[in-house]
Amino acid sequence: MEIREYLSVEGRSPFARWFNKLDARAAVRVTVALNRMEQGNLTNTKSLGGIFEYKLTYGPGYRVYFGRDGDVMILLLGGGTKKTQSRDILSSQECWVDYKKRKIAGRES
């Protein structure tokens, strides 16, 4: 699978903003999870009505939020922890809606 990051109209990546704040150990765990996703291993995922949540069993319960665009691409929408899960899901769903609108209009990121 190809993995890309969602970029806002301003060119910002919510996923990168979250990832860049992680400590080194958490960043390694998330990177391993992304490698597994890239290989098609989505066993730790849960559908959340249009988007998906990949749950890591490490630290405060890290989560990676993404959308699937066909069978070959995963679009990273954001990340968070169990504590911020509700807010992170809403934010990721908004990013997904924006991505789909811009894709239809021919301006996806």
Image: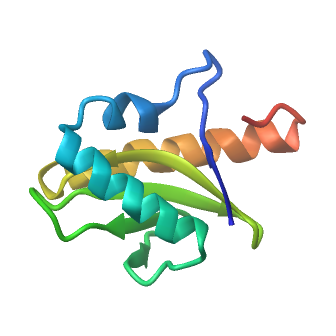
Q: Is residue 47 left or right of residue 11?
A: left
- Out of 106 and 81, give the one closest to the viewer: 81
Q: How is the image coloured?
A: rainbow
**Residue at the location (64% across, 38% down)?**
98
- Most extreme residue toward the top, as rendered? 10
- On the image, the x and y values in percent for residue 39 come to 59, 73
Q: Position of residue 73 (x, y in %)?
A: 71, 60
Q: Quadrant of the rendered structure where residue 17 is? A: top left
Question: Which picture quadrant has residue 15?
Answer: top left
Q: Is residue 49 visible?
A: no
Residue 32 occupies quadrant? bottom left
Name above or below for residue 24 compared with residue 90. Answer: above
Seen at 54% across and 22% down, the residue is 12
Give percent across and percent down for residue 66.
51, 57
Relative to the observer, which residue lies in front, 64 or 102? 64
Q: Tell me what residue is drawn at x 34 percent, y 54 percent.
A: 30
Q: Where is 65 relative to 103, above or below?
A: below
* Count of numbered labels shown in the rendering: 0
Is 33 above or below relative to 15?
below
Which quarter shows the N terminus?
Answer: bottom right
